[in-house]
Amino acid sequence: MSTPRIEVHDDDQTLATAVAGELLTRLEEAQEAGRQPHVALTGGTFADVVHREVARLAPESAVDWDRVVLWWGDERFVEHSSPDRNAGQARAAFVDAVGIPDRNVREVPPADRCDSVEEAAERYAAALDAELGGEGTGFEVVMLGLGPDAHVASLFPGHPALDAAGRSAVAVHDSPKPPPQRVTLTYEALNRNRALWFLVSGDGKAEAVARALAGRAGQPGEAADRHDVPAVGATGTEETIWFLDRAAASRL
């Protein structure tokens, strides 16, 4: 696994522009190398800013969007039309704007199209394993946000999903953030990648960033356990980057 690298930008907008540009470059390079890049997106306020920057910069790139496949690290188990869905947020911000075809968008089954959150997780895991379960396959990039409690995707401190084994996606009940039911990729799936990027903005995340990076990337302190700080369990095989604005990096 790769050693984490920290990249700090002045504010959330310059950070979003940097991440969007890096993603476009990464997709171009993957396609030039003959790979069809699979990307795991994250949700949230800052992710929306990044996605809109991708849409803004996309016309200047050489990315063939017909050969990009999208997934999500986690999803809220709500109806397909709910504004709470990460997939809906991403579609509105950039997916439709850049022209990624529906056949390349791998959404978690919503609550109005399956009987339970467990079924949604099973179906999502089966789809992922069918495409990215073989040796030498994986995400080109996994993008993760970070909660104030240092959770990533829907892997929360103390929750059973932290110890899920032999499964690519699991159901989450009693999420400390609403809505209570979610589907999340497990560490086994998230770490099946070439690169993993943390996207973190704002001083409300600064303490979580410091806890996650303690004892790593040249930072002082003792490394935390993933059961207490879930972010430490996610890593890239070739590249792990913490994209931070100055506010999020203020405790480092």
Image (cartoon, rainbow, N blue to C red):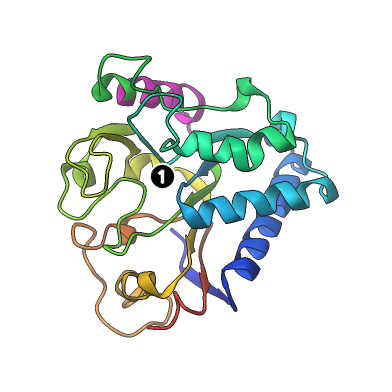
Assign the magenta stretch its main secondary structure: helix
* Vertical comparison of 192 with 170: above or below: below
- The percent coordinates of residue 106 (x first, y second) are 51, 27
Quadrant, the C terminus? bottom left
Q: Is residue 149 magenta?
A: no
Q: Is residue 29 visible?
A: no
Rendered image quadrant of residue 163: top left
Q: What type is the residue that disc 1 sits on?
A: Leu
- The percent coordinates of residue 66 (x first, y second) are 73, 29
The residue depicted at 38 percent of the width and 59 percent of the height is 146
Residue marked by disc 1: 190
The residue depicted at 25 percent of the width and 19 percent of the height is 116
Does 163 sit left or right of 103 as displayed?
A: left
Nearer-the-camera pick, 237 or 250: 250
Rendered image quadrant of residue 73: top left
Give the magenta range: 121-138
The residue depicted at 28 percent of the width and 39 percent of the height is 179
Q: Is residue 80 visible?
A: yes
Nearer-the-camera pick, 176 or 221: 176
Q: Is residue 126 magenta?
A: yes
Does 163 sit left or right of 58 as displayed?
A: left
* Vertical comparison of 104 with 230: above or below: above
Nearer-the-camera pick, 192 or 69: 69
- The percent coordinates of residue 148 (x first, y second) are 31, 64
Quadrant, the N terminus? bottom left
Does 221 sit left or right of 22 as displayed?
A: left
The residue depicted at 62 percent of the width and 20 percent of the height is 103
